[in-house]
Image (cartoon, grey):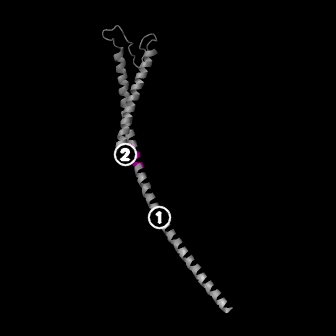
Amino acid sequence: MIRLAIAGAAFALVLGAGLFYGHARFEAGQKEVQGRWNEERVIAAVKLAEETARVQLLETKYTRLAKEMEDDLKPRLADATASSADLARRLRNAASRTCSGSAVRLPAPTAPGSSGSAAEPGNGSGLGATVDAAIEAHLGACAQDAVALEGWQEWWMEVQ
């Protein structure tokens, strides 16, 4: 019986030592894995901070470029609008002249803000006024679109 007790105690000791060793190795492995995860988190945090700083620099650069382009575009758009209004005025003046060799006489344009009777042609009422306004609006929109497109092209070249 003593032998059986000694054998049982020896078995329990070996089993306990094996379990303790296995548990110690498991905890060491867990600590190693946790250490690698912590290292990877630090590396990821550093990379995130670098990317965030880079993105902020790019946003600052793009915001500055957009502001410069907008400040440059405003006077150019005003010039384009004035130029298209002048072109529309010149087209109306040219259209109002007598066509050479023709008996057709187009209505004369009126100056903006001038008063004329409703019976006079070219007094700003009727089909002539509608066509004049449409031509002026169309030319203005075309000029503004062209200037805006040039601005986008300049901005894109700066961004590249």
Quadrant location of residue 101? top left
Q: Is residue 116 above or below residue 31?
A: above
Quadrant location of residue 133? top left
Q: Which residues are magenta?
A: 59-65
The span from disc 2 to disc 1 (Cα, nearest Å) is 34 Å
* Dot 1 alpha-carbon crowd within 10 angstroms: few under 14, some 14 to 19, many 20 or more: few
- Front residue of 111/150: it is 150
| 7 within the magenta span | no
Task: Identify the residue shown where x is 40% and y is 46%.
Answer: 62
Side of 99 where 16 appears, left or right:
right
Type of amino acid under label 1: Glu
Mark found first going from the N terminus, 2 or 1: 1
| 64 within the magenta span | yes
Q: Position of residue 35 (x, y in %)?
A: 49, 69
Element type at marker 1? Answer: helix
Q: Is residue 60 above or below residue 43?
A: above
Question: Which callout, 2 or 1, points to the residue nearer the camera?
Answer: 1
Mark sitting on residue 159? 2
| Residue 72 visible from this viewpoint | no
Say which residue label 1 marks. Answer: 40
Would you say the magenta stretch is mainly helix, strand or loop?
helix
Type of amino acid under label 2: Val
Q: Position of residue 61 (x, y in %)?
A: 39, 48
Q: Quadrant of the N terminus?
A: bottom right
